[in-house]
Amino acid sequence: MRERLTSSVALGLLLALVVGTWWAADYAQRAIPIDPPRRLTHEMDAFIDRFAMVQIDETGVANARLESPRAVHYPDDDSYEVITPRAVSQRPDRSITVATADTGVMDQDGERVVLSGNVRLQRQNADDTPDLLIETTVLTLLPEQDVAFTDQPATITREDGSRMSGIGMHYDNQTRRLRVEADTRVKIMPRAADEAAPPHR
């Protein structure tokens, strides 16, 4: 009888030890992540020399591209920072535009390019549209929509010397419409004014 009682006590203690060990291991596993998720910080993970990103239309024809001597990729937002970028929009039915700057950032899967520092956007003449030069400090390009805009002071100069300046600008290359938001100042050269005036009768 005593041996059976001793065996039962030993078995109970062993069972309690097994259950306690299992509970402790399960608690530790739930309390402390064994494989915590990887933290994404804004630190570069790759760089590309002679960077070029090309956008093509549904027929496979290139209609926009971004070029830079060097691009740096950041994994947290999947963006590319580029130096001295050159962004070109070239569609058969529109004027060619070329934008340059000191630096730029391309994000949103290439749907947005933000240019900064000494930004110059030149629209080349086509058909009856004269050359146009837009100068500002920050300019956002939407290549898919062929649109450029800024909320900073901007100066727009035509090839005939006429000039417009103001704060905030929006240019749509598809419709060729240019809008200056506020504090607009316009200087029209005499020749351009004469061409715009109605003929004398």
Image (spheres, grey):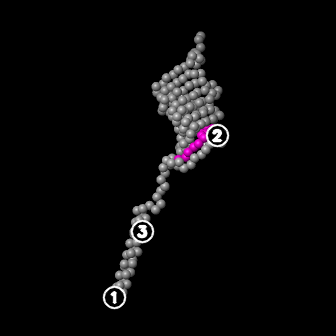
In the structure shown, which secondary structural element does the residue marked by tag 1 occupy? helix
Residue 107: percent from left, percent from top: 53, 43
Magenta-tinted stretch: 62-74
Check if mark 3's residue and mark 1's residue have beta carbons within 8 Å. no
Tag nearer the camera, 3 or 2? 3
Residue 32: percent from left, percent from top: 42, 62
Instruction: Say which amino acid is labelled 3.
Output: Ala
Depth order, front residue of 12/104 = 104
Q: Is residue 64 magenta?
A: yes
Q: Is residue 10 magenta?
A: no
Instruction: Say which amino acid is labelled 1.
Output: Arg
Instruction: Say which amino acid is labelled 2.
Output: Ala
Q: Is 1 on the left-hand or right-hand side of 123?
A: left
Q: Residue at x 54, y 23 (%)?
A: 163
Residue 191: percent from left, percent from top: 59, 17
Mark on residue 69?
none
Which residue, given by chain and number where applicable, does mark 1 sit on?
2
Q: Earlier in the sequence, mark 3 or mark 2?
A: 3
Which residue, given by chain and number where applicable, does mark 3 sit on?
25
Mark on residue 62?
2
